[in-house]
Amino acid sequence: MKVYSISLLSINSATPATSTVLCQVNDLSSFSFYQRGSVGEFMGFFTKTVAERTSPNTPSSVEENSYKAHVFRTPSAPGKTGLACVMITDLEYPYRPAFTLITKILDEQSSLVSQLPTPGSSSIAGGSNPSMAASGGLSPAQKGKLEATLQQYLTKYQDPTQADTIMKVQKELDETKIVLHKTIESVLERGEKIDNLVERSNALSNQSKMFYRTAKKQNSCCVVM
């Protein structure tokens, strides 16, 4: 079992939503050195796509090739900002510890909402401060603290039994309420195709797009070394 990525995003209430990655931490040690750049870009692309396309207040898990993205979005009023947390794992990682950790992160970071600009709004996060703009409105100190927290969880929850302690003090998760999607296509708008989103994405380099096409033909994205 493996956790590849944990991300926290700010997100608006539009359909489809617009999001900004506040912080993302990855563990790509199971991939070859030459694959890590492309894999990392796809983790970011997959994270934003599922965060923006799944429904608020609904725990969802989306499969894509050999990955599974577990996601939960907090509800927000029109024109207001919410949070989303996405955890990308292999297919074997169990649902319960994944959503237990996601809930914990969203609870701990809930105070950030009032401090953040709405993604997609005309206001520039951080004003003339490029570092704050790149972090969705977080100060360098906030970004550093959040990154350290998520990195700690990424390391600790490689072992899903670590969730046992917080599961005892949190409300029991009703796994029947988790919406399961066998492919990412099932969360896209009618007529949308993941191939088209990949080709139009400015977040993916030409090398990563070629990597995606090759991996899809082989029906095995990002072979683990």
Image (spheres, rainbow, N blue to C red):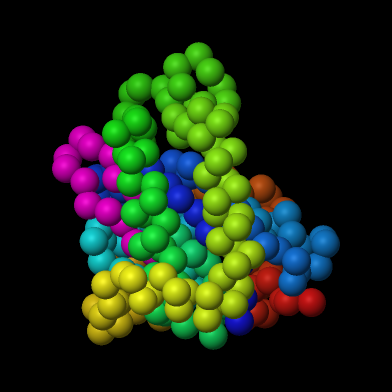
Vertical placement of residue 142 versus 101, above or below: above
Task: Give residue 173's position: percent from left, percent from top.
Answer: 29, 77
Asked if 74 appears above or below 90 in the picture, the reply is above
Stretch of the chain drawn in magenta: 70-84
| Position of residue 117 measured from the top left corner of the image (x, y, whole percent) | 34, 30
Residue farthest to the right, as pictured: 33
> On the image, which quarter does residue 180 sit in?
bottom left
Residue 24 visible at all:
no
Q: Is residue 167 magenta-colored?
A: no
Q: How many marks?
A: 0
Give the quadrant of the N terminus. bottom right
Between 163 and 59, the residue placed more toward the observer is 163
Question: Residue lying furthest top in this view?
Answer: 128
| Rendered position, 165 above or below 26 | below
The reply, left or right, for residue 1 in relation to residue 181 is right
Residue 14 in percent (x, y) is at 24, 45
Q: Nearer the viewer, residue 35 or 148?
A: 148
Q: Is residue 101 left or right of residue 58?
A: right
Q: Position of residue 27 (x, y in %)?
A: 67, 62
Name the one closer to the observer, 108 or 181: 108
Residue 132 seen in this snapshot: yes
In the image, what residue occupies the spot 75% across and 66% down?
A: 29
Q: Residue at x 68, y 71 (%)?
A: 222
> Any magenta on residue 83?
yes
Rendered residue at 44%/41% (across/down): 20
Q: Quarter of the image containing the C terminus?
A: bottom right
Query: What residue is rendered at 63% in x and 64% in y?
Result: 155
